[in-house]
Image (cartoon, rainbow, N blue to C red):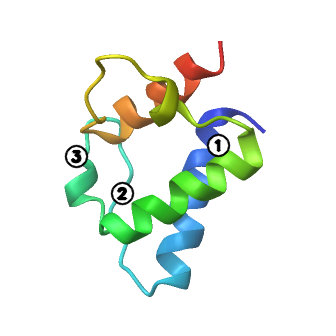
Amino acid sequence: MSIRSEILSQFHQVAKEQDKRLANLADDLELLDSGLDSLCVAIVVSRLEDSLGIEPFSTAEDTGFPVTVGEFIKFYENAAR
């Protein structure tokens, strides 16, 4: 499974578990408008660390938090390199 697919899968799974209505996850959609709150995003990040073995937030230097879904995916893809 690709990083993109795993991230999108986790977004959908967490939204379902937390009874959140998920927006259409286009790359230009802001995370704040995704339908997930900060707790949900934290759950996604935790699960991605388990499933992908990547935790880019602890190794990122001078990088702001991703704002859009596309930036979030690229953040993980870049950390995997």
Q: Earlier in the sequence, mark 3 or mark 1?
A: 1
Q: In front: 65, or 18?
A: 65
Task: Say which residue label 3 marks.
Answer: 30
Residue 43 x %, y %: 52, 65
Residue 61 x %, y %: 37, 17
Residue 16 x %, y %: 53, 80
Q: Residue furthest top?
A: 81
Judged by depth in the image, the label closer to the viewer, 2 or 3, is 3
Task: Say which residue label 1 marks.
Answer: 5
Q: Residue at x 65, y 35 (%)?
A: 54
Q: Does residue 39 appear to the left or right of 8 in the view shown?
A: left
Q: Are marks 2 and 3 in contact (CB under 8 Å)?
A: no
Task: Say which residue label 2 marks.
Answer: 24
Q: Does residue 34 lie above or below 58 as drawn?
A: below
Task: Determine crowd level at label 3: few under 14, some 14-19, many 20+ residues with C-alpha closer than 10 A.
Answer: some
Residue type, label 3: Glu
